[in-house]
Image (spheres, rainbow, N blue to C red):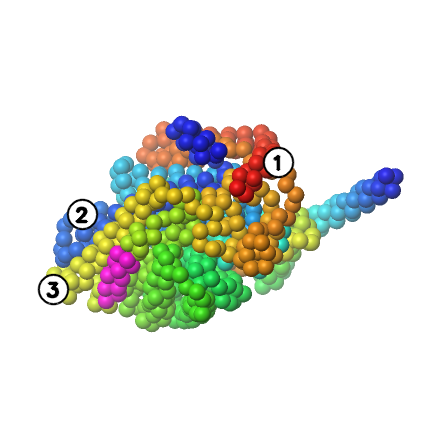
Amino acid sequence: MTDTKVNNMSKESFRRQKSREEMQKQLISFGLMIVLTLVAFAVVAMDTFHKGFVIPFLFLMAIVQAGFQFYYFMHLKERGTGMAALLIYGGVWAAFLTLAGLIVISWW
Amino acid sequence: MATTAAAKRSFWEFIWDYLTTVDHKKIAHLYLAGGGFFFILGGIEALIIRIQLIKPENDFISAGFYNEMITMHGTTMIFLAAMPIIVGLMNAIMPLQIGARDVAFPFLNALSFWLFFFGGLLLNLSFLFGGAPDAGWTSYASLSMDSSGHGIDYYIAGLQIAGAGTLMTGINFIATIVTMRAPGMTYMRMPLFTWTTFVTSVLILFAFPPLTINLFLLMFDRMFGTAFFNVALGGNQVIYQHLFWIFGHPEVYILILPMFGVFSEIFATFSRKRLFGYTAMVFATMLIAFLGFMVWAHHMFTVGLGPVANAIFAVGTMAIAVPTGIKIFNWLLTMWGGQVTINSAMLWALGFIPTFTIGGMTGVMLGSNVADYQYHDSYFVVGHFHYVIVGGSVFGIFAALHYWWPKMFGRVLNETLGKLTFWPFFIGVHLTFFVQHLLGLMGMPRRYWVFLEDQSLDLGNLISTIGAFLMGVGAIIFVINIIVSAFGEKAAADPWDGRTLEWAVSSPAPYYNFAQLPLVRGLDPLWIEKMEGNGKIPAAEPLGDVHMPNGSIIPFLMSIGFFISGFGFIYQTDNVYWYLALYGGLAFSIALMIIRSVKDDYGYYIPKEELEKALEGEAK
Ligand code: HEM
Ligand SMILES: [Cu+2]
């Protein structure tokens, strides 16, 4: 009886610590995302960089941000999310094909 | 006990029950009834087309009405007949096959149905209010931007509403299969019909958004003065074609993949053998779905995309023939050396193989971009897609209905009438559509109101029309069969000596599906228990109270709201008062959404005692 109680307590405190760490990570990634957004803005606003650098750089930023979004805010990094990840990448693939098709064949 | 209660229920209680149901089995009934109704409507439209083309320079219907007929025939058959019937079959069977008590979101499931129903109704009401859409089921911007009247607006609003329902179904089925499989039901133990339901749902999830966007762009252009497709203002009509076929090609796989699943179940059951090459079948399905997203431009070879793009899409298209061929061989090898029983369900499956193979072959011919310059927009194409759609989807629907009728409605369909359905229909299909290939090669264009005398097109068209009527005969016999067997004997739980979980519960399944969730020990779980156990599926949990969702009228009302706002969208260009309908309908639906979100509904429990009683009754 007491044993299980102690056990439950430690489980509870373990869970709390876990979620505290989790919260920290969320906040850090949230901060990072704001910084990245500012960087992206700055690169465009400063007007000193060449277009050939700015555009790929913006794409890179976008991909990083999407990664943060999926893995931290939508919890894709947790275990047991393999199927969800597969579907998301499937959707990304379908969207990519659509855009590539339109850009390459229609507008180029 | 349940039957006497049902007999005592009044008519209005029966209607109310179906209006508010969230039970996947009853929603399946609704889908089959709704899809069946639209199938008859689309069939009548097809017959009108064929009567018009029975002889040269016929004037049975006017040119304008002919355009409405071909448009509504195609749109109805694809969006309102074939897809809903297929979704109905999935609803009825997939949860049973994975050992679940319902789909993941029963409320959404009901909403999906009612959106489909009211979307279809809206589209067809165009006939009464000033004329149906007339730009073909593809509704290319070049035609639809120029179409006067409100026909095209009905097309946009109707498909937008029905399409939202379909998209939700896709998400619902994915969630169901990922999260609600019974203990032991690993992915690689799922029956092929469940697998194809899963892959089809993924296709729906990815293919419907391009359609939605395309319809929105068309709507903005027609109703709100934008210029996406207005060339004079710098728009581009080819974008419409791309977006349409990025949806459209996956769509044809949405129509055929579930049927591949059906045939796999039927061949295995009636050959009394495990499906040959199960793993290959699963991966072939995924491969077809994957490649299906990369070939859309084979519908646009003559648009002028250039030789490089055309060549790439031609090669991709032909690649799809490989996984499809794998499937055909696996079905043949399933029958090879099996104890084959040929009944109605099996007849449709057997008829499917040569018919679909011919359709696949003409498909490869069309996939050759060079040759397609000859075939495109000719009757050859009409012949091709009917061989695959009728020979694949419609044969599959008939096969599935004969096979699962006992499980869905508690009656076995009459065998003699079943065969009498098949033969006229089968012969009719080949009469109607085979000659159409030849007509196309002789130069008869598609979607033309009349053809001229003495161009050697007379005989072929006559034969084609006769075949269409034969199909009609088959369809009527099927309806007779439904009525006759409704008065027949009650079906046994497992009339076909089945292999999968749906045959382990009574026919029709009890409303909670499984009193105890089943424990699955391998592929074809029921067959394993028949061979190695006592023929009964072991339970994975002790008998206890079962949690069930409450029914709700909200999905029905919510869909009415969208239906009304659909009219508002269509007519607000004529008169500002229609904004009342537009915003009023939307506000009504949104209010219902808020009610649904705020009001908690915890469902109810079936007490353990009731389940015990039911189990005892079954044992007797
Ligand atoms: C009774 C059986 C059927 C007959 C006799 C029939 C006949 C026809 C005819 C004559 C056309 C018009 C050809 C033209 O001039 O362009 C047509 C078009 C079409 N049919 Fe069928 N059909 C049948 C069943 C089906 C089914 C079951 C489906 C789909 C599930 C279907 C899908 C289509 C489509 C998509 C078109 C093209 C419409 C367009 O070009 O806009 N048909 N059919
Ligand atoms: Cu295609």
Image position, residue A71 (x, y; %) = 67, 53
Q: Residue at x 33, y 72 (%)?
A: B370
- Ranked by sequence position, the earlier of labels 2 and 3 is 2
Q: Would you name the residue on which mark 3 appears? A: B454
Chain ID for label 1?
Answer: B
Q: Nearer the viewer, residue A7 or A103?
A: A7
- Looking at the image, do the residues carrying marks 2 and 3 touch, with CB atoms under 8 Å apart? no
Q: Find out whether residue B116 is within the magenta segment.
A: no
Q: Residue at x 26, y 60 (%)?
A: B427
Q: Residues within 10 Å of mark 3 (few under 14, many from 20)?
A: few
Q: Outermost residue toward the front?
A: B620
Measure the C-alpha gap from mark 2 to mark 3. 22 Å
Q: Residues within 10 Å of mark 1 (few under 14, many from 20)?
A: some
Q: Residue B37 sits in which quadrant? A: top left
Residue B65 visible at all: yes
Q: Residue B571 sits in which quadrant? A: top left
Image position, residue A55 (x, y; %) = 58, 59
Does residue A71 appear to the left or right of B153 in the view shown?
A: right
- Provide the residue span drawn in magenta: B423-438
Q: Residue at x 59, y 32 (%)?
A: B604
Q: Amino acid at mark 3?
A: Asp
Residue B449 visible at all: no
Q: Amino acid at mark 1?
A: Lys
Q: Which mark is residue B608?
A: 1
Question: Marks 1 and 2: which is nearer the front?
Answer: 1
Q: Would you name the residue on which mark 2 appears? A: B62
Q: Which mark is residue B563?
A: none
Image position, residue B352 (x, y; %) = 36, 61
Q: Look at the numbered disc 3 and give the secondary structure of its residue.
A: loop
Question: Marks 3 and 1: which is nearer the front?
Answer: 1
Measure the C-alpha gap from mark 3 to mark 1. 76 Å
